Amino acid sequence: MGAQVAAFALFVPLVGLVLLALVAVTAAGVLTNRRVPPTPSEAAEVARRHGGTVHAIAWVAAVLLPGLVLAMLGVVTLRVTGGGDAYASVVTATYAAVPALTFLGVHALGERTWPRPTGPVRRAALVPRGLTAPAWLLGVTVGWGTALAITLLVCGLTADDGRRLTLGNSSASPYPGWQYGVPVALAATCVAAATWAVLRMIVRRPAVLDADPRYDAASRLLASHRVLRGVQLSLALTLAAVLSFASAATSSVGLVGLALAIGVTAVAVVLASVAVALVPAAAPSIAVTAAWPASADVPTAPATGASDTPAPEESTHR
């Protein structure tokens, strides 16, 4: 019982930080969407507005909808499982996955409804495209996921009966052992798969009509940045939650110094992920591009990954 009280005492401030972070990120996204450089064409302006609107809706949905979804899932799960360990495991997994999957779902819908070229003449550069994403942000996202996997593995190996930490005659629960760690790991895997799918949709979406290929590449880089900064925040907050419960249980069995270190790490993870989420992406600018075709030299944005995918619509049709 003491461990549960300690866990909630540590976790409640983190929840407050999370809510403030999401509000701040949403506000920052809306404000930065208003201050953008001019676009090179009417089609580019339509695409810019579409992307900005989708991103703002994604943040709002990630903040507001999960509460309702989790409440409904919690009631259904409670009736099906009757409570107990199975109920706790399912609820743990859904709490870790629902906000991120909501965020990614809105972005996926936005990519599916991306403005397509219209008119009798459609012109775009025939250039191969691979997965385009900011390398540093992709690294941060992978780093949070790796840290979460390692933390769950360590907690699973040190847990007693999958949900309890025991040291001598002292025992504390809840502790993120296998009972909670496996569902959280599965939820994180679903988030990673959904992220990859959305990034691939960004690669395959129609090119911006009558815009320099560099502008189109920068637009895709911006979209990937928006997706990844939300995903890294979700993974980091999941990691912080796992660490907070591990810290409370560790403190209850007498390892106060270790518990303090784990708790400080949890707070640091939250603050770092919020700072990353608040880093704005550079909007595509016509300051470095001109109406095309201007030359045969078509540079592309920095890319990660190696899958070259020419888009079939990127040609001239009459």
Image: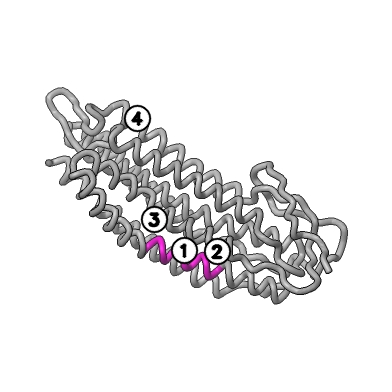
Q: Residue 230: x and y, percent?
A: 47, 55
Q: Is residue 54 left or right of residue 77?
A: right
Tell me the residue that label 4 is attached to.
154
Local secondary structure at mark 3: helix
Instruction: Give the labeled residue for mark 3.
Output: 99
CA–CA distance in space, label 2 to label 1? 9 Å
Indicate which disc, 2 or 1, sits on the residue closer to the N terminus: 1
Crowd band around label 2 with a 10 angstrom C-alpha radius: few (<14), some (14–19), many (20+): many
Per the image, the residue denoted by label 2 is 110
Alpha carbons under labels 4 and 2: distance apart:
38 Å
- Residue 67, image x, y percentages: 31, 60
- The disc, 4 or 3, on the residue closer to the chain's N-terminal end is 3
Q: Amino acid at mark 4?
A: Val
Give above or below for 287 relative to 162: below
Mark 4 or mark 2: which is in front? 2
Three-letter code, disc 2:
Gly
SS at circle 1:
helix
The outermost residue toward the top is: 168
In screen coordinates, is 266 left or right of 168? Answer: right
Question: Is label 4 or label 3 in front?
Answer: 3
Residue at the image point whose x is 39% and y is 49% from the top: 97
Q: Which residues are magenta?
A: 52-63
Q: Nearer the viewer, mark 2 or mark 1?
A: 2
Q: Amino acid at mark 3?
A: Pro
Quarter of the rendering containing residue 300? bottom right
> Which mark is first along the chain, 3 or 2?
3
User: Alpha carbon of mark 3 to alpha carbon of mark 1: how far?
Assistant: 10 Å
State whether residue 237 is above or below residue 166: below
